């Protein structure tokens, strides 16, 4: 048997839908497991107004089970036996003595699948973890993302009866708000569910809606935008793209501004000419089937025109005052209440970057915060500054650095392309981190209102990928700990023990850290490496147990060849030869180390011999842990 | 083609037919229809209510001397409160669009997530901006909290931007070209209001006077809140105290437009307005409880 659940809701925010479908699949899988029901979650799909799940291959119900329950000791007497039998719902004569205790055979009737689902659905539905919920029936009533308006719950051909937030389950769904054939609810079966929806202008499957949008834009050179496509897929039930146009004259505005207006404010795709430049066109995606009289197109065009007019007004107004002339205005713009103004921030940033274009860029970097354009389109901070700097005749390196100094905006985003841009981005982020940490604004748990994690992550990314050596070792302890986490996150695709080992060898220079990680990865699989790593772990433990803190090695005090050989082998290992070669060289110590542990008892009775052996091991660890601390390497079978 | 006033008549009639009291605009300056006592106070407590009214809403910082085709110092909102929310509220809302002549079969309508929040009023709700052919024409909100108090019933609030709606219906590029009544454009009726108040708000408003007025009205609101705490009664002028809050809010907006409030100060001043707003909301709720009302 199949089970179909459709939760009919008012329009759900698009970005919450996919995580919710994932949750629903998990919740159903768990429900089946908890109730020992076979069955498969076939799919979970959604539109803005409905979340639907199909579970297939369900049995009629649970099997009837016979369970043996153990009761009081047989010596407890007939009263105890009667009590136990009553509690178990069996006749006292049926009790059997086993291992000195009364036992009862209890038959547990399996519940039908319908009963299980009916009982579980309200909690499953209201248990969906939404980012932000509301109530609509009054204080203290159930919460959901938006009001629940109908529920379809069909097991085979029958309705599974239950009620959630005053809505009783049924076999009635609803079509598209305007295009449905009738405003009356639509009776469906599991077999005809998707077709009935389609007949009423609801494309249930997100992939199908996405294809419908893509098909409608096929011949138009739309600027690809996966995130926008995703959004439009989930704010429509019957998406249809239409092409609109705007006057060529708006193309004199910066392209970034035009795209931001279209994308962020209007959810339009931009259109590109064959040469890659912006065409005076856009694609809007309607939640309806057609625009026969062109009303939707002309309406959208008019809205866009008004938006572009605003942008043009801002752009022209902004040209009345150069970025440089705005410097003083930054004294009145608060960066952070406890820290001070943006004017003060740029002074600090300027001292962090090399002289030349980077310093000029730092000086002007925040001036665009006072422009009308950035006040209106905050996402364009930096970008607008860069465009204006170029227009106002600042050197290209200055303009470019300002343009991209907020990058990288995420782990996936690229770092600034120019060295000046990289320095400026580093200075901006490092200053923010230092100052926020200084006044105690340190992120905790999920709270990170000033996006400090992103700032630190950006620094790590720029240092590694820009191959810049900016030592982080002089930062405060709290900030260093914070960076450590970000570095681990950055290198999350490397085995964690290799990251630990390499970081134990120091991480102030991230370019260097990466080189050591690469080398470690390359030698990890070689024959001698892991056994040697195991020995290093042993060395570490021995030194820790002995609380030995170093001392001179005296070759005259050796009394075993194994010691002498190890010492000689250590002298012969060349480490100043590139990390990979150095590690390979170190790995050749393995036989000597193995022999040492085979032949020699470190804890020799003679204190002088003992301390000399410890000194040898100490030197071994000291000398060969600079690239990576091998004792951090986790080995499956440690000897 | 319907004139601006005809559109207003039709919307009022539509909501009157659905059981709404048709109120007149509130006579103290407000930044939005939400701030009128008909919304801010009536949504509190357990008594059902339905009301619709046009509210001229002042946003001094949005003034553009009558030169920008889309931005106004004072715009007109049609505010509808349905408490509690009927189950078919969205269908009723869509019906109102059809009532003013929008054939929804020929247009594109979308509900895009937009949760409304007013820090100065300690109020927030969950909802959407309603997009008609890419134009935001209505803010639709399920009120959750007001004056920091959870609402007993969950009212739906529909706020129509009347200028946008009229410009859309009349196919006008500028709000000033909207026909307000036969023979009168929006500019004929409102242009001087926009221009002169922009001049005053941005250039001439006396900052010291505004601060003094702010403090005077704030003190009066605080005094009334303190008096009520000592001796709550059914006849206590809670509504008068709320007028003082509205005065504070408008004065804050004027000071802000005048550039007299630094970014640092802003949060603090908002908190002051919020404090008296929350105080009055609590008075209102308490006054409605049986032991005070008795």
Image (cartoon, coloured by chain):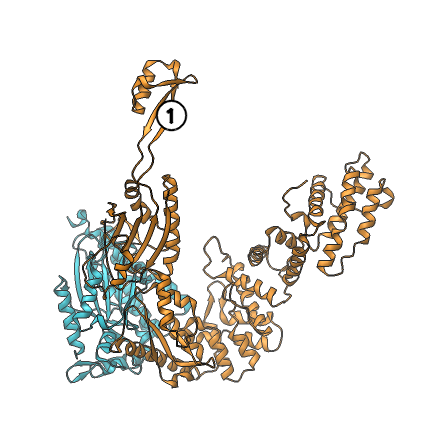
Chain colours: A orange, B cyan
Quarter of the rendering occupied by the C terminus of chain A: top right
Nearest to the observer: residue A554 or residue B215: A554
Q: Is there any visible trace of residue B37 in the rendered image?
A: no
Residue A124 located left or right of residue B44: right
- The answer for which chain carries disc 1 is A
| Image location (x, y in percent) of residue A383 | 48, 75
The residue wearing badge 1 is: A68
Nearest to the observer: residue B226 or residue B166: B166
Residue B33 located left or right of residue A318: left
Nearest to the observer: residue A161 or residue A416: A161
| Image location (x, y in percent) of residue B210 | 31, 71
In this view, A294 is above or below A100: below
In percent of the image, x 39 and y 55: which residue is there? A19
| Image location (x, y in percent) of residue A453 | 51, 59
Q: Residues within 10 Å of mark 1 (few under 14, many from 20)?
A: few
| Image location (x, y in percent) of residue A420 | 59, 74
Quarter of the rendering occupied by the N terminus of chain A: top left
Q: Is there any visible trace of residue A318 in the rendered image?
A: yes
* Res. A245 image quadrant: bottom left
In this view, A309 is above or below A631: below
Count up the numbered dots. 1
* Res. B19 image quadrant: bottom left
* Res. B240 image quadrant: bottom left
Q: Mark 1: which secondary structure? A: strand
Residue B17 located left or right of residue A614: left
């Amino acid at each position: 048997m199949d089970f179909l659940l459709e939760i009919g809701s008012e329009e759900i925010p698009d970005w919450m839908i996919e995580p919710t479908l994932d949750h629903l699949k998990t919740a159903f899988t768990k429900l089946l497991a908890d109730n020992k029901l076979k069955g498969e979650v076939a799919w979970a799909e959604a539109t803005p107004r409905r979340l639907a799940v199909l579970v297939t291959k369900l049995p009629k119900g649970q099997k009837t089970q016979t369970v043996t329950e153990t009761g009081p000791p047989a010596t407890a007497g007939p009263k105890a036996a009667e009590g136990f039998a009553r509690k178990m719902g069996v006749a006292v004569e049926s009790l059997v003595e086993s291992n000195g205790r009364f036992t009862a055979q209890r038959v547990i009737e399996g519940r039908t699948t319908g009963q299980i689902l009916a009982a579980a659905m309200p909690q499953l539905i209201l248990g969906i973890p939404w980012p932000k919920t509301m109530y609509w029936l009054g204080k203290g009533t159930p919460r959901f993302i938006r009001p629940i308006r109908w529920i379809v719950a069909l097991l085979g051909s029958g309705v599974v009866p239950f009620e959630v937030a005053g809505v009783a389950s049924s076999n009635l769904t609803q079509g598209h708000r305007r295009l449905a054939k009738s405003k009356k609810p639509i009776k469906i079966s599991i077999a005809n569910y998707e077709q009935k929806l389609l007949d009423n202008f609801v494309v249930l499957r997100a992939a199908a809606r996405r294809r419908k949008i893509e098909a409608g834009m096929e011949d138009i050179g739309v600027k690809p935008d996966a995130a926008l496509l995703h959004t439009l897929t989930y704010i429509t039930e019957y998406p249809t793209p239409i092409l609109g146009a705007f006057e060529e004259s708006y193309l004199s505005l910066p392209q970034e501004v035009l795209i931001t207006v279209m994308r962020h404010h209007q959810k339009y795709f931009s259109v590109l000419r064959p040469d890659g430049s912006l065409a005076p066109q856009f694609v809007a995606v309607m939640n309806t089937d057609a625009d026969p009289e062109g009303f939707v197109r002309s309406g959208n065009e008019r809205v866009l025109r008004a938006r572009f007019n605003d942008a043009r007004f801002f752009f022209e107004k902004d040209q009345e005052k150069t970025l440089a002339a705005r410097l003083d205005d930054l004294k009145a713009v608060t960066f952070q209440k406890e820290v001070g103004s943006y004017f003060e921030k740029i002074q600090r940033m300027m001292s962090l970057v090399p002289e030349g274009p980077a310093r000029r860029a730092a000086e002007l970097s925040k001036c665009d915060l006072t422009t009308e354009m950035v006040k209106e389109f905050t996402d364009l901070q930096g970008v607008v500054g860069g465009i204006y700097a170029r227009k106002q005749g600042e050197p290209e390196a200055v303009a470019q650095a300002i343009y991209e100094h907020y990058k990288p905006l995420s782990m996936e985003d690229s770092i600034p392309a120019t060295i000046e841009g990289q320095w400026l981005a580093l200075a901006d982020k490092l200053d923010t981190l230092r100052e926020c940490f200084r006044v105690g604004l340190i992120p905790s748990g999920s709270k990170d209102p000033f996006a400090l994690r992103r700032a630190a992550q950006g620094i790590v990314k720029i240092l590694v990928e820009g191959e810049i050596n900016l030592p982080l070792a002089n930062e405060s302890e709290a900030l260093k700990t914070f960076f450590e986490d970000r570095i681990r996150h950055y290198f999350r695709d490397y085995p964690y023990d290799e990251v630990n080992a390499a970081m134990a060898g120091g991480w102030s220079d991230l370019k260097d850290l990466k080189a050591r990680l690469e080398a470690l990865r390359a030698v990890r699989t070689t024959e001698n490496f892991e056994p040697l790593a195991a020995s290093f772990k042993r060395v570490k433990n021995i030194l820790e147990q002995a609380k030995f803190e170093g001392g001179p090695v005296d070759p005259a005090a050796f009394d075993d060849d194994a010691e002498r050989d190890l010492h000689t082998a250590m002298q012969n290992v060349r480490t100043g030869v590139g990390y990979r070669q150095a590690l390979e060289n170190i790995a050749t110590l393995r036989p000597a180390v193995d022999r040492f542990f085979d032949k020699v008892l470190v804890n020799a009775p003679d204190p002088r011999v003992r301390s000399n052996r410890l000194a040898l091991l100490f030197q071994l660890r000291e000398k060969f842990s600079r690239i990576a601390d091998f004792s951090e390497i986790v080995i499956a079978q440690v000897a | 083609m319907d004139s601006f006033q005809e559109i207003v008549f039709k919307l009022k009639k539509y909501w009157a037919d659905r059981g709404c009291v048709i109120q007149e605009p509130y006579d103290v300056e407000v930044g939005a229809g939400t701030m009128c006592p008909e919304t801010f106070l009536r949504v509190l407590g357990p008594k059902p209510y339905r009301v619709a009214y046009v509210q001229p809403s002042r946003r001094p910082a949005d003034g553009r001397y009558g030169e920008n085709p889309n931005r106004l110092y004072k715009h007109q909102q049609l505010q509808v409160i349905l408490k509690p929310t009927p189950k078919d509220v969205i269908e009723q809302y869509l019906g109102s669009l059809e009532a003013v002549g929008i054939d929804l079969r020929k247009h594109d309508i979308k509900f895009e997530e937009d949760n409304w929040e007013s820090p100065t009023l300690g109020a927030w709700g969950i909802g959407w901006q309603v997009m008609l052919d890419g134009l935001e024409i209505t803010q639709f909100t399920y009120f959750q909290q007001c004056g920091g108090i959870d609402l007993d019933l969950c009212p739906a609030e529909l706020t129509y931007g009347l200028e946008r709606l009229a410009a859309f219906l009349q196919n006008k590029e500028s709000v000033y070209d909207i026909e307000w009544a036969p023979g009168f454009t929006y500019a004929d009726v409102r242009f001087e209001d926009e221009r002169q108040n922009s001049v005053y708000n941005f250039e001439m408003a006396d900052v010291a006077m505004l601060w003094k007025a702010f403090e005077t009205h704030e003190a009066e609101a605080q005094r009334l809140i303190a008096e009520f705490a000592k001796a709550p009664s059914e006849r206590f002028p809670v509504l008068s105290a709320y007028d003082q809050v509205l005065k504070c809010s408008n004065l804050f907006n004027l000071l802000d437009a005048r550039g007299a409030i630094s970014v640092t100060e802003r949060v603090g001043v908002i908190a002051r307005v919020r404090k008296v707003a929350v105080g009055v909301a609590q008075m209102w709720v308490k006054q409605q409880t049986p032991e005070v009302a008795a």
